[in-house]
Amino acid sequence: MLRTALKRWVWSGIDPTAISNINPIRLTNIAALFIVFLSLLQFPTTLYLLQTSVYYELTTIFLTIFLLCLVPALNHQKCLATARCLLISVYALNILVSCLLLEINLNIQYFLILAVLICPFFFNEDEIVQMLTSIIALSVLFLAVEAWFYIKYPVVEHTFHQQVLRISYTCLFAFFCVLSGYHLWTNVNRSWRKLANERIRSEQLLLNILPASIALRLKEPHALIADYFAKASILFADIQNFTPLCKSRSPQQLVRILNEIYCAFDELSMKYGLEKIKTSGDGYMAACGLPNADTKHAVHCCYCAIEMQKAFHQINQKHKLHTGLRIGIGCGEVIAGIIGKNKFSYDIWGEAVNLASRMESHGLSNKIQTTQSTYELTKHKFEYVKRGPINVKGVGSVDTYWLLGRKQILG
């Protein structure tokens, strides 16, 4: 229970999935918790050593603990600047009041210099004015307390010149701490910026491999990605006579052409809401209705297939490929999930997937072949010609249809 409470305190107001720098918020919470803990440790010492000012010192401790308990609550409410300002102010006032109550130079004021070195980590890169204001104010307060002690409780054995020299070195020490705090702040933020850029880059690479919702689930520890979809459509596209094409082109030309084709297919898949599953050689596989359900999955697949044929025809003419594109579409139950540990991939399985693959492999050049189920779901939107039954390995006789194009709306 205690561990859970501490974890909630430290992570209050923080989105674990955020790409932005979360360290300032987390360190603010940690610093507040640390000061509360130290304040609790002051109770025995205060009760034992202090007599005349014990009431005031205990009041200061209680107020410090109460106010610092508000820091994570304010961060949770997204009042980040208020929480940070409260933390710094309460800490500085606690040191100041302690120095005034004790009336003896115990060097407690040097905790203000510690704050000068730590305080910069509470600020983001775009908060340089607030950061500099805070550390300069803490340094000025430190020098003011030091000067007050020198004036009210001077060291008798020190000469005037020694006092001046001591004050000078104190000022130099405070100035050095301000510069050190600023230097640490700039370097930490520079490192965080690089880390954030790398994280964005890795996130983008992951999103290029996996659907966004799947990539988010994959971040969970020991996550097993396995989903069932009762209704989804699968599209297979394959370039006919690809092997002879490989022999007639250089590797650079071949890869450039394939990249152009697949980039065009990727754009069309995104346009119509299809999820690209994978490419294998000259084969392209996509699906609609997963990982997010779509009641018009079959219609979108057909729209995409028609546009793919048009795009491929243009590329075919541009590069004089003298080849064609076969497309097969099927729909039905699908299982989807992540397989593999190294070079893992999001893949789909099921009879509908196998049937869609057969629609492509048993099709003809520059034609789109669909199953009976796809035809029934889309016949109100598209023109079809019945091909008739074909024998599919592992399934048997299957009625198939040629998808011709969109239905013409008569005015």
Image (cartoon, rainbow, N blue to C red):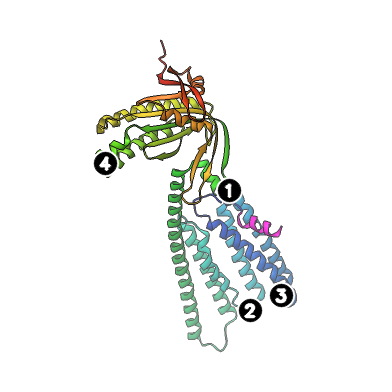
Counting residues from the N terminus, which is met first, the one under dot 1 or under dot 3? Answer: 3
Image quadrant for the N terminus?
bottom right
- Looking at the rendered structure, which numbered label has been put on residue 289? none
Q: Which residue is mark 4?
A: 253
Q: Which residue is mark 1?
A: 223
Q: CA distance from mark 4 to mark 1?
A: 41 Å
Nearer the observer: mark 4 or 3; the answer is 4
Counting residues from the N terminus, which is met first, the one under dot 4 or under dot 3? Answer: 3
Q: CA distance from mark 3 to mark 2?
A: 16 Å
Image quadrant for the C terminus?
top left
Q: Amino acid at mark 2?
A: Ile
Per the image, label 2 sits on a secondary structure element best described as: loop
- Looking at the rendered structure, which numbered label has been put on residue 45? 3
Residue drawn at 32 percent across, 35 percent down: 242
In this rendering, does residue 81 appear at all? yes
Counting residues from the N terminus, which is met first, the one under dot 4 or under dot 2? Answer: 2
Rendering quarter of residue 251: top left
Residue 232 coordinates in the image, percent (x, y):
52, 30
Q: CA distance from mark 4 to mark 3?
A: 81 Å
Rendering quarter of residue 4: bottom right
Q: Residue furthest top?
A: 411
Does residue 57 appear left or right of residue 91 in this picture?
Answer: right
Residue drawn at 27 percent across, 44 percent down: 252
Start-end of magenta stretch: 1-11
Per the image, label 3 sits on a secondary structure element best described as: helix
Q: Which residue is mark 2?
A: 104
